Amino acid sequence: MALRDLTRSVAGGALSSGMARLNARHPWSHNDHFHRWILDHLPVQRRAALDVGCGQGGLVATLAPYFGEVVGNDVDATMRVAASQLCSGLANVRIDGGDWSRLDGPFDLVTMVAVLHHLEVGRAPEEVRGLLSPGGRFLAVGLAPPTSIADHAWDVASIVTNPVIGFIKHPRANRGGPQPPPYPVQDPTTTYDDLRRHVAAVMPGARMRHRLGFRHTIEWTKPADR
Ligand SMILES: C[S@@+](CC[C@H](N)C(=O)[O-])C[C@H]1O[C@@H](n2cnc3c(N)ncnc32)[C@H](O)[C@@H]1O
């Protein structure tokens, strides 16, 4: 049983609901937290960027000052309205609702934050590779169900540090209970190790790392000669 699930069964769920209340009082976005990591790993060439599954558009707006053009794509119409509103003053941003893999590239950056597990894992990395310019970069922040010892160890670290990070990022306590996520969510099913195999098959040399916050990151730069 995964530790995340164990916390739900300990003392009739008291541990899990206590943690949820604590997190609601000192909330932090486990996705937005990685925007800094993305900014720290931008490609050298910055003509166009694509954020797949852009949700409410926070990352699209964050990338806009760094690229000639930024496309935010999301399958959900409510998310596209929110993203369009957030980015309404940004002339180089376009919010799109078509099939992301058929967009006109190339892009120097393709990002996915908490999105890869919504997609077909057997196809998505190849489609990203096809959209990237030579020297272009894929930066993804993802989720996977914990199965290996390493996954469980990172889960323990994430469970322990989660409230600490919440206190640091949001020291003033919120009133009210846990809020539902502001975007469509889906439970991940592909394990970290399986995902790494899928990614390595089409993105040789990709760097995949476990992270705090129940996340992992994937970083790959398309070779300049392909
Ligand atoms: C967990 S949310 C993350 C949203 C955003 N990236 C963030 O970090 O706040 C996943 C997003 O992926 C979008 N999504 C799911 N399947 C998609 C697809 N096939 N193409 C584009 N977007 C998709 C959902 O509508 C949702 O907004």
Image (tube, rainbow, N blue to C red):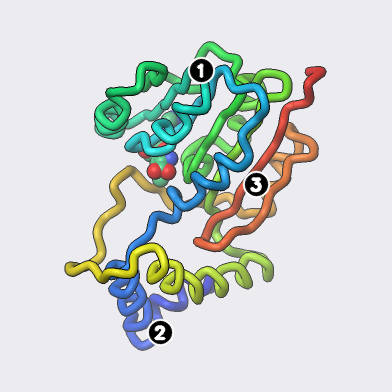
Of callouts 2 and 1, which one flags the residue occurring earlier in the amino acid sequence?
A: 2
Report the amino acid beneath label 2: Val
Q: Position of residue 19 (x, y in %)?
A: 36, 75
Find numbered disc 3 in the image and state the secondary structure of the residue it sits on.
helix
Q: Badge 2: how crowded within 10 Å, few (<14), some, or many (20+)? A: few
Which numbered disc, 3 or 2, marks the residue that appears first in the sequence? 2
- Marks 3/2: CA distance? 30 Å
Name the element at disc 2.
helix
Tags 2 and 1 touching, CB below 8 Å? no
**Mark nearer the viewer, 3 or 1:** 1
**Residue underneath mark 1:** 68
Q: Position of residue 199 (x, y in %)?
A: 69, 39
The residue nearer to you, when weighing 149 against 172, is 172
- Residue 83 left/right relative to 70: left
* Position of residue 71 measured from the top left corner of the image (x, y, whole percent): 44, 22
Q: In the image, what residue type sits under mark 1? A: Gly
> Is 219 positioned to the left or the right of 73 in the image?
right
- Rounded to the nearest angstrom, the CA distance separating label 3 from label 1 is 31 Å
- The residue that label 3 is drawn on is 195
Point out the quarter of the image occupied by ligand 1: top left
